[in-house]
Image: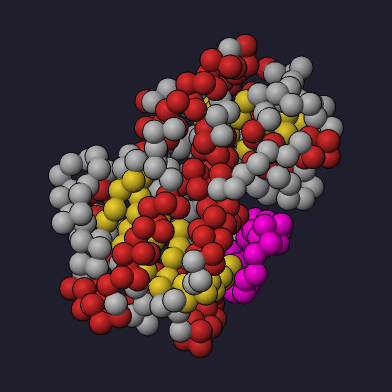
Amino acid sequence: MKIWIDITNSPHAHFFKGLIRELEKSGHEVLITAREFDGLTEIMDMLGMRYYVIGKHGGATLEGKLIASAERGYKLAKLIIEEKPDLAIYKHSAEAPRIAFGLQIPSIGFVDNETAVGQNKLILPYTSLLIYPKAIDAYELLRSGADANGMRPINGFAELAHLYGFIPDRRVLKELGLREYCYIVMRTEPIKANYFNGDSERSVLENVIPLLPDVPVVLFPRTEGQRKRFEHFDNVIMPEHAVDSLSLLYYAKLMIGAGGTMNREAIALGTPTISTYPGKLLAVTKWLVELGVEFHSNNPKEVAEHAVELMERNGVYRNHIRTVISAMENPIDVILREIETYDEIGAFEVEKSLNAGKLWGYADLNDGGDKKRK
């Protein structure tokens, strides 16, 4: 079977790397497409992926996003018409679901951001099987057009998939001049995201760093403007190119992030984490806070005080995080099981079921927890 995977954001490369390897091991042909955005292709090269680059991110404006998406959709459609894949898989891709739907290609989509309503309305109505963390209220996704008969919640979160085949490597510490468990990793706000409604001209981290002057900070800005605002801090290191961020997070004393992905990667690795995201929290973030594996605050003093506590009692927090995480589902395992189910149905049955909107047949959305197959 030929399986098309569309990768549109740098974290998605880590999300899909394990799935790609497992599919290839099983004898499937994997077609990978990507776009130019936030060092994505550099990361995919580092991971040894072979892919087509189609289009780019449109920037922070609505006009730019619309034009870039339209241009990418046209070019991507031409490639997919030529390649004729049997199944499409994506995570928050705005173009792949519509192309797959238009060409009657069954699709599996993973969504973990219910606040990205505009993007979700371009994705969910055209997705055959939607996989999502059970922390998200299913009705939030239904409002954006998801099919109740094609929804599969999981007891977990996306970044657990990033750990596929992960073996920590100390070489990144040597490259940056760091010692293990003696530094903090930070990530700035996602100011280009369509769901971001915070202050794009200032980061809360600018007020946190002065309160932690004796600890080295490895900071990952998202734009050149953000980079310039942190250049004057003596204890801040900002990598100039893609690095082994998972190993960096594994050996970090603490993660403080104004975004989401690196925070959840740190949690998946057992590293204590503080969220400083300034807008409406994702359901997944709220869930992780409730489980006691993540702390959230926008108050610099509170963040610094909690950072000191987490660093002083680091081992206790790491053990708690790893205990909680061990009981969760890995998205890779779920997606692979669904692909096996699809492969067993046969082309005719798939087409008939897809037209009926019941290919995977998940319903009973009254329960916010695990759903059962009909």
Q: Is residue 185 left or right of residue 141?
A: right
Of residue 202 and residue 253, the one placed in the foreground of this image is: 253
Q: Residue furthest front?
A: 26
Q: How many marks?
A: 0
Point out the stretch of residues depicted in magenta.
35-58
Considering only vertical position in the picture, is 153 above or below 275? Answer: below
Considering only vertical position in the picture, is 52 above or below 365? Answer: below
Of residue 182 and residue 282, the one placed in the foreground of this image is: 182
Residue 200: image x %, image y %?
58, 43
Q: Is residue 310 magenta?
A: no
Which color scheme is applied? secondary structure
Of residue 38 and residue 332, the one placed in the foreground of this image is: 332
Residue 3: image x %, image y %?
47, 72
Residue at 39% from the left image edge and 33% from the top image edge: 327
Q: Is residue 66 left or right of residue 200?
A: left
* Quarter placement of the N terminus: bottom left
